[in-house]
Image (cartoon, helix red, strand yellow):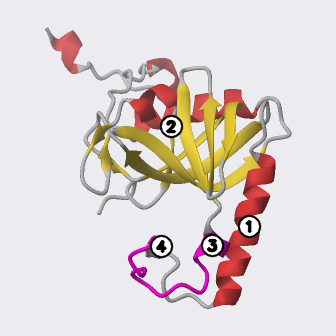
């Protein structure tokens, strides 16, 4: 398991939507597997249902489909595996005490209150696929107060793309006057 598989990788929408699917993880162009992501943008579409909230996050490069599950209270008290009529309890909730499930439900409602239409938010979550479409299953939503947060996220994504995600970095210029080094570079040996 690589370091990017278990960490929330800062991605722009165009990078996230361009990921090629694999079983539990999604591959990036540089060959590193990514299963969790972080994005910053404006909520441009929002739909609430009984068990979830779907919203689109626009960061200027595209729109990321996001889903925030609110079914913690509905699933509390059901036996693991379901009874055939009700859905099975997700693995991340199975075996947890009711008080912890209630705490997670309150946290999800708090996240839902921050993911409002037109809000600038930072979201973190797992990359999942639903009916062949890539989406971000949100684990956390933070309302951004700084209007420069989106621009800073862009710069951080570009920096990570150059340094970590396998994209080549431009060569650094050699400043010979500062170091006093008069060696020839391989290109000058000619």
Q: Is residue 188 above or below residue 11?
A: above
Residue 184 at x, y percent in the picture: 26, 18
Front of the two marks 4 and 3: 4
| Quadrant of the frame with the C terminus | top left
Mark 2, mark 4: which one is toward the viewer?
4
Q: Nearer the viewer, residue 187 or 75?
A: 75
- Between disc 3 and disc 2, the foreground one is 3
At label 4, counting other C-alpha atoms closer than 10 Å, the crowd grade (few under 14, some 14-19, many 20 or more) is few
Q: Is residue 154 magenta?
A: no
Going from the N terminus, do you reach mark 2 or mark 4 first?
2
Count neighbours of disc 3 (C-alpha within 10 A) and say few if under 14, some if 14 to 19, many if 20 or more.
some
Give the CA distance from mark 2 to mark 4. 36 Å
Task: Determine whether the residue tagged by mark 4 lies in a helix, strand or loop.
Answer: loop
Task: Assess whether mark 4 and mark 1 are in contact (beta carbons under 8 angstroms).
Answer: no
The region drawn magenta spans 72-87
Circle 4 is placed at which residue position? 86
Using the rendered view, name the quadrant where residue 46 is placed: top right
Residue 107's tag is 1
Task: Determine which residue is flagged by label 3.
Answer: 74
Q: Secondary structure at mark 2?
A: loop
Between the C-alphas of marks 1 and 2, the distance is: 24 Å
Residue on which disc 2 sits:
11
Task: Identify which residue, 148 or 59, lies in the foreground.
Answer: 59
Q: CA distance from mark 3 to mark 2?
A: 32 Å
Q: Earlier in the sequence, mark 3 or mark 2?
A: 2
Q: Is mark 1 in CB contact (under 8 Å) with mark 2?
A: no
| Residue ID at (21%, 13%) | 187
Element type at mark 1: helix
Q: Residue at x 43, y 49 (%)?
A: 127
């Amino acid at each position: 398991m690589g370091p990017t598989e278990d960490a929330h990788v800062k991605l722009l929408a165009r990078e996230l939507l361009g990921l090629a699917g694999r079983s539990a993880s999604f591959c990036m162009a540089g060959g590193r597997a990514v299963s969790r992501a972080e994005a910053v943008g404006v909520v441009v579409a929002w739909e609430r249902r009984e068990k979830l909230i779907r919203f689109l996050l626009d960061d200027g490069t595209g729109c990321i489909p996001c889903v925030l599950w609110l079914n913690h209270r509905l699933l509390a008290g059901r036996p693991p595996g379901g009874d055939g009529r009700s859905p099975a309890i997700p693995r991340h909730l199975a075996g947890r005490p009711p008080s912890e499930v209630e705490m997670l439900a309150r946290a999800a409602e708090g996240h839902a209150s921050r993911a409002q239409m037109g809000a600038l938010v930072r979201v973190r979550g797992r990359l999942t696929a639903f009916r062949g479409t890539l989406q971000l299953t949100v684990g956390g939503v933070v309302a951004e107060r700084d209007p420069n947060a989106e621009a800073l996220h862009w710069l951080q994504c570009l920096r990570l793309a150059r340094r970590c995600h396998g994209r080549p970095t431009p060569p650094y210029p050699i400043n010979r006057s500062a170091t006093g080094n008069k060696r020839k570079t391989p290109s000058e040996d000619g």
